[in-house]
Amino acid sequence: MTYVIGETCIDVKDKSCVEVCPVDCIIGGDEDRMLFIDPAECIDCGACVDPCPVDAIYAEEDLPPEWAEYTEINREYFQDREAARAKVAVKEVPPPQLD
Ligand code: SF4
Ligand code: SF4
């Protein structure tokens, strides 16, 4: 099991989750539109969920069905960064609704 970052992180990327992750497994560069959780490192603690201002983070089994592909996109980022970036690059998302 792992936690997964979904679509509402795109173009928000405020990194509130990064600050609380005890194993530093939430990664993303300046060139990325969102951040990604490394499923091989995530210890399923859930600490990153509440700090996210756009409710982007879910346990894998609770991920909204319309975001199903993000499980693979998060995983792929740590195996083929450019492939994951390409999938996110084409996403058209509404402007962020921050709390
Ligand atoms: S669930 Fe815990 S270990 Fe996994 S990404 Fe979130 S804060 Fe990090
Ligand atoms: S807290 Fe939410 S919006 Fe901010 S970087 Fe993490 S997943 Fe993205």
Image (cartoon, rainbow, N blue to C red):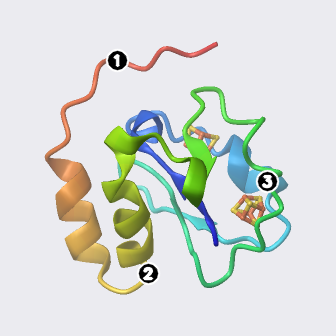
Vertical side of 80 occupied by 54: above or below: above
Q: Is residue 76 visible?
A: yes
Say if 7 sits above or below 31 in the image: above
Can residue 31 be seen in the rendering of this structure? no
Residue type, mark 2 in image = Phe
Quick one: SS at disc 3?
loop
The earlier-in-sequence mark between 3 and 2 is 3
Q: Which residue is mark 2?
A: 78
Per the image, label 2 sits on a secondary structure element best described as: loop
- Dot 3 amino acid type: Gly
Query: 56 left or right of 89?
Result: right
* Disc 1: which residue: 95
| Ligand 1 has an atom within 8 Å of the beta carbon of the residue at disc 2 | no
- Asked if the residue at tag 2 contacts the one at tag 3, i.e. Cβ–Cβ closer than 8 Å, the answer is no
Quadrant placement of the C terminus? top right
Q: Amino acid at mark 1?
A: Pro
Determine which quarter of the picture holds residue 73.
bottom left
x, y percent for residue 22 = 85, 67
- The Cα atoms of the two marked residues, 1 and 3, are separated by 26 Å
Quadrant of ligand 2 in image: top right
How packed is label 2: few (under 14 Cα within 10 Å), some, or many (20 or more)? some
Q: Is mark 1 within 8 Å of ligand 2?
A: no
Does 76 sit left or right of 18 as displayed?
left
Mark 3 CB lies closer than 8 A to ligand 1? yes
Q: Which residue is mark 3?
A: 46
Q: Which numbered disc flags the more N-terminal residue, 1 or 3?
A: 3
Mark 1 vs mark 3: in front: 3
